[in-house]
Image: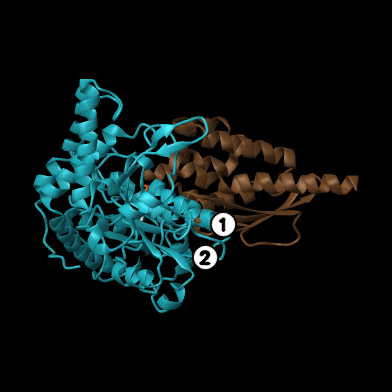
Amino acid sequence: MQLESMYQEIILDHYRHPHHKGLREPFASQVHHVNPTCGDEVTMRVDLKGDVISDISYESQGCSISQASASVMADLLIGKSVEQAREVQETFLRLMQSKLDGPEFAEEHEEVLEDAVAFAGVAKYPGRVKCALLSWMAWKDATAQALDDTESGVKA
Amino acid sequence: MVVNPQFLDTDAIRKDFPILQRTVHGDKPLVYLDNAATSQSPQQVIDTIVEYYSLHNANVHRGIHVLAEEATALYEGARDKVAAFINAGAREEVVFTKNSSEALNLVANVLGWAEAPYGIRPGDEIVISEMEHHSNIVPWQLTAERIGAKLRWFGITDEGRLDLSNLNELINERTKVVSLVHVSNILGTVNPVETIVKRAHEVGALVVLDASQSAPHLPLDVQALGADFVAFTGHKMLGPTGVGVLWGRRDLLEELPPFLGGGEMIQTVTMEKSTYAGLPHKYEAGTPPIAEVIALGTAVDYLNGIGMDKVAGHEHAITEYALGRLQEVEGLRIIGPATNEDRGAAISFVLGDIHPHDVGQVLDEHGIAVRVGHHCARPVCVRFGIPATTRASFYLYSTPAEVDALVEGLDQVKQFFGV
Ligand SMILES: Cc1ncc(COP(=O)(O)O)c(C=O)c1O
């Protein structure tokens, strides 16, 4: 069945038992993103120590794909430098834009994507790509804000 | 409303709808249960569009050649059909728009611009309800904000009915306009128009009815309803996209200012000032969706051929069956009236903790098309404390077997997500 290509076991696992969920202190920035077409929502906090992402915490509501995506992302990005994390985020974005070539793209970039390769099958469902990207976009936004704040803090 | 619940001969009807013959995801027959979002078109409607462009295409009201005259006659003929379909007092009361949304925006804007006695002024009140489609919320918010008028609304009861407990307080001497959905696209509720119209007119307020989900499904008599404006949309009643209807009382439409300016809506134009065309052209600026209007006329013919009382009866029967079957599904909760009184053929539900997006995805895999999300009625989801619903909505070609397929599909959903 086609469905299993989207709903990989790893996605269903993260959906049922999400990692790093719940809002935590301390945090450098917080954002709230919604997917207006389906009403999925995420509140996301990012904390930085120097240029390392020391924590990502979130509260979210949505489908299995959006929930699992937040969980996998937090797993992958916590502990990485901002630069490394950006590479993962950009690669994940490209994976989601790869349409039918998702599986090949994922295989090629497995080293960067790690567990996020599980989302390769989502790329061919245009209606679900936004679900998978919701938390990644929120993270990108929150991290940019956190960096802005530290920069202006340094200058001040 | 008295309806006689009786199934139509769907075998015969379905033969008219080419799209219902197709399969999806390989060999799965299409089970189309998303009629509240858009309906499918019979071959007759499709042929009308082909024939129009093959034989009669021209701009309307603007030429003296054969094609222009044919196109104009077909276009105005469709207006007669629509006027008769809703029992309008006069054909001039039927204005073609792009869709329901544009019809509602038209009313919300011109009431904002109008002089006394109809114009909305600072401090006036506009009443809507919590179960409106966004198309009947946002235009009024825009008008209220611009003018400094106050937007108020009816709540919803736990059963998914309009909460009328504060009717007389909510609609009062300050109320300028009440704009209400006739049949809710998310809850399926049929609202008590008579009660609302009576109270609104008592205090001198105008009534706008969003009939997007009623015009396609029940006999609609705008004179009997007593509302001042009625809006609906072609693509939900077997017609094409791109065309909607605003019916308005003639004296009001004559008095109110125009909405969009342009060709066709004028009498004379000077560089300083223009005078406006008579009804209905005053509200139809620019080249209209000609083929779509004519095809909507064919859709109306098709519905009349079956009989709107029979369409309503069929949908009542299928809704009865679906409500029963769905309530047998463990963990399923209906959002909206769980009984069939004053109820349309759209049924929203949640299935345990499984997100509607996931429900819809698995159903799609089985060829079953439903809508998931907040159905452009987000306040309803907030009211019921849910992020979204899954909605199955039926029409004259829907069958009990399709309801069975849905119920089986829901079992598959539960299996897939291990609940
Ligand atoms: C109750 C109701 N009102 C308004 C609309 C808007 O219709 P349209 O998108 O054709 O303008 C819809 C359809 O989605 C509806 O169901």
Q: Which mark is residue B147?
A: 1
At label 1, the amino acid type is Ile
Residue A8's x, y, as percent?
45, 46
In the displayed structure, does residue B172 sit left or right of residue B408? right
Q: Local crowd at mark 2 within 10 Å, few (<14), some, or many (≥20)?
A: some
Q: Nearer the viewer, residue B118 or A105?
A: B118
- In the displayed orientation, state which residue is furthest to the right: A156
The reply to whether discs 2 and 1 touch (Cβ–Cβ < 8 Å) is: yes
Q: Residues within 10 Å of mark 1 (few under 14, many from 20)?
A: some
Quarter holding residue B301 = top left
Residue at image location 47% in from the left, 37% down from the top = A123
Q: Chain of mark 1?
A: B
- Of the pair A40 and B288, the residue shown nearer to us: B288
Picture coordinates of residue A81 (x, y %)? 75, 42
Q: Give the answer, above or below, for where A99 lies relative to A20.
A: above
Residue lying at 41% horizontally and 56% vertically, measured from the top left: B133
Numbered disc 2: secondary structure: loop
What residue is shown with label 2? B124
**What's under tag 2, amino acid-wise?**
Asp
Residue B349 location, x and y as percent? Answer: 35, 63
The chain drawn cyan is chain what?
B
